[in-house]
Image: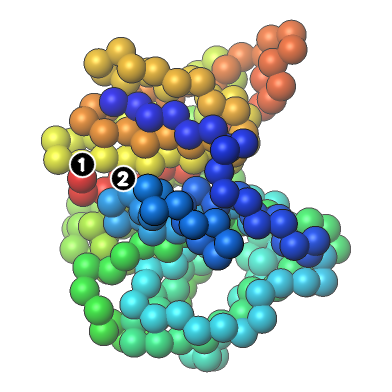
Amino acid sequence: MIKYIDHTKMGRGQHGWLDSHFHFSFAEYCNPQNIHFGALRVMNDDMVQSGTGFDTHPHENMEIISYVVDGELTHKDSMGNERTLTRGQVQYMSAGTGVTHSEYNLGGGLLRFYQIWIFPDKKGYKPNYGDVRFKLEDREDRWLPVAASVENKASSAPIRVHADINAYAALISPGKALDFEVAPGRQAYLALIEGNLSLLGRDNSSANLVMRDAAEITGESFTAAANSPAPGNAGGGTAAHVLVIEMAA
């Protein structure tokens, strides 16, 4: 089944320097019926103004992935890492027993990135950080493996997390489609970062998504098709930029 999630009905956090869409309960958005989806606890679509950002703050016992859409994301942490990432690049932090970090937009334009928190399979891991400077073309009309469980020996994903998930990104050209297999006992959460997208499940459930929409997919595999340009179709003609987190149901 495909459950469509309208971005206009998501939680919001608007603070001048920061404008966020909350896929799940976070900060000032509290919905007891929308705390998490499987191991996925947080997915925030954050837009951060130039010269601002998140001051140093703590995390523990959470696997955290940051996916940069536009602009520059500068990370600094208590492990001694200081890195700046740009469009299409991804950072990973295992908070484990405890870490502090800051995230700033030190660039001249708007920063947009997805902040993703995943429950670890157990508490107490040693904190860790890494980042991968993926090329945009590596995800053109294909599912690019971004992250996977440290236990998943079959995956080529360079980022490894302490959770039973697989994360993929794709840029689907208008008029093209990609199949995504969801194995029995598994499910997927899809976020449409940019463009327009049509989803068709194997049991004929379907949904049409525009930028910032999302979908929960349970009990079936699906096809993701980028919509071709059409009059009045906002976003038509733009590649569908898609992020999928696949996990145990």
Q: Is mark 2 in CB contact (under 8 Å) with mark 1?
A: yes
Indicate the quadrant containing the C terminus: top left, top right, bottom left or bottom right: top left
Q: Total of numbered circles in the picture?
A: 2
Location of residue 213 in the rendering, given as x and y in whole percent from the top left corner? 54, 35
Question: What residue occupies the far left of the structure in this picture?
Answer: 184
| Residue type highlighted by circle 1 | Arg
Q: Is residue 137 visible?
A: no
Q: In 3D space, how far apart are the residues under numbered discs 2 and 1 (Cα atoms)?
A: 7 Å
Residue 55 badge: none
SS type, badge 2: strand
Q: For mark 1, what is the residue?
A: 186
Indicate the quadrant containing the N terminus: top left, top right, bottom left or bottom right: top left
SS type, badge 1: strand
Q: Is residue 17 left or right of residue 204?
A: right
| Residue type highlighted by circle 2 | Glu
Question: Residue at (46%, 63%) from the top-left corner?
Answer: 65
Question: Residue at (40%, 49%) from the top-left corner?
Answer: 34
Give neighbour class at mark 2: few <14, some 14-19, many 20+ (Cα, 10 Å).
many
Q: What colour scheme was applied to this rendering of the protein? A: rainbow
Location of residue 150 in the rendering, given as x and y in whole percent from the top left corner? 24, 66
**140 or 178, which is in the foreground?**
178
Question: Residue at (57%, 49%) from the top-left corner?
Answer: 11
**77 or 88, which is in the foreground?**
77
Question: Residue at (14%, 40%) from the top-left corner?
Answer: 185
**125 or 141, which is in the foreground?**
125
Residue 246 badge: 2
Location of residue 175 in the rendering, given as x and y in whole percent from the top left corner? 55, 15
